[in-house]
Image: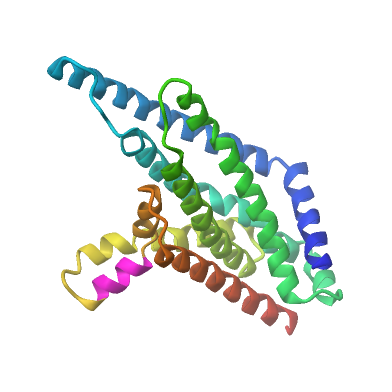
Amino acid sequence: MRNIFVLVGKELRLYFISPIAYVVAMVFLAVSDFLFYNQIRFYSGLSMQMMQMQGNMPELNIHESVFRPSLMNMSIILILIMPLLTMRLFAEEKKGRTNELLMTSPITITEIVLGKFIAVMVVYLLLLVLSLHLPFVLSVAVPISWSPLFASYLGLFLMGGVFLSMGLFASALTDNQIIAAVISFGILIGLWMVSPSGHNAGDSAFKEVAGYLSLMSHLDGFVKGLISTRGVTYFISMTCLGLFMTHRVVESDRWK
């Protein structure tokens, strides 16, 4: 465990002495705030229209009307920016030949992979924590149910594990950060688009498989406020798959 914590500290220092983490955080928060603001405006306009028609303030579910679409939009933003967080993790080591020192050090491949993964997960968790200012600001004006919001953020956190493990795998495949980002983006888009493909397959086994593999369907359950063991198992299994593939690629590099 000591080796893992040393690697986590090293990677976190590299994140915060470079502009990557700050630029990603700025873009993520700016776009998320803009989309959240637009959703609030839509919710307010809808409330006013219903009040004019009914003569009193309507009872609208603010989580379904505001947070659910906003958080689903946030997940799409993450598809675009997560590859930027993971692209350098192995690709930069390969390009700078520092991976040779890492591979010959008394550190196991499992410790290397987990150290880098935990570091980028910490950065991602900070992004999620920073985005919590949105519900806190809104809670000043209207009452908010925090239970479904907790489930939603848990879903985003688990989904982030899948995104980052796949990005880590993509970074291990090449010494070019841009190529790593493109590969990672392609994998994430593929996982995201599994559900629409399944819907077009009609009643078939492929539809059932596509429904289970779809990130969108599992995340939507969490964003609705439902924490299911099926969803948790899916996200953890996909994260472990990404880490396993990364481990195999790094292990093959050690023997070259």
Indicate the quadrant containing the C terminus: top left, top right, bottom left or bottom right: bottom right
Q: Nearer the viewer, residue 205 or 223?
A: 223
How many discs appear? 0
123 versus 190 height, above or below: above
Residue at point 65%, 48% (across, down): 123
Q: What is the quadrant of residue 141 in the picture?
A: top left
Regarding residue 47, the answer to whether it shows in the image is yes
The front one of 68 and 124 is 68
Percent x, y for residue 210?
31, 69
Quadrant where the N terminus lies?
bottom right
Farthest residue to the bottom: give it. Answer: 255
Q: Is residue 101 left or right of residue 182?
A: right
From the top left corner, tell me how far across and down residue 46 is, in percent: 24, 24
- Judged from this view, the residue extending furthest toward the left is 53
Is 45 magenta? The answer is no
Question: Based on the displayed image, in which of its 4 quarters is residue 41 positioned?
Answer: top left
User: In the image, residue 186 lies at what x, y percent?
Assistant: 45, 60
Residue 91 in view: no
Magenta span of residues: 206-213
Residue pictured at 81% horizontal, 65% vertical: 98
Q: Residue at x 61, y 48 (%)?
A: 125
Relative side of 56 to 61, left or right: left
Q: How is the image coloured?
A: rainbow
In the figure, 8 relative to 204: above or below?
A: above
Task: Please identify the quarter of the rendering in which residue 102 is found.
Answer: bottom right
- Determine the main secondary structure of the stretch shown in magenta: helix
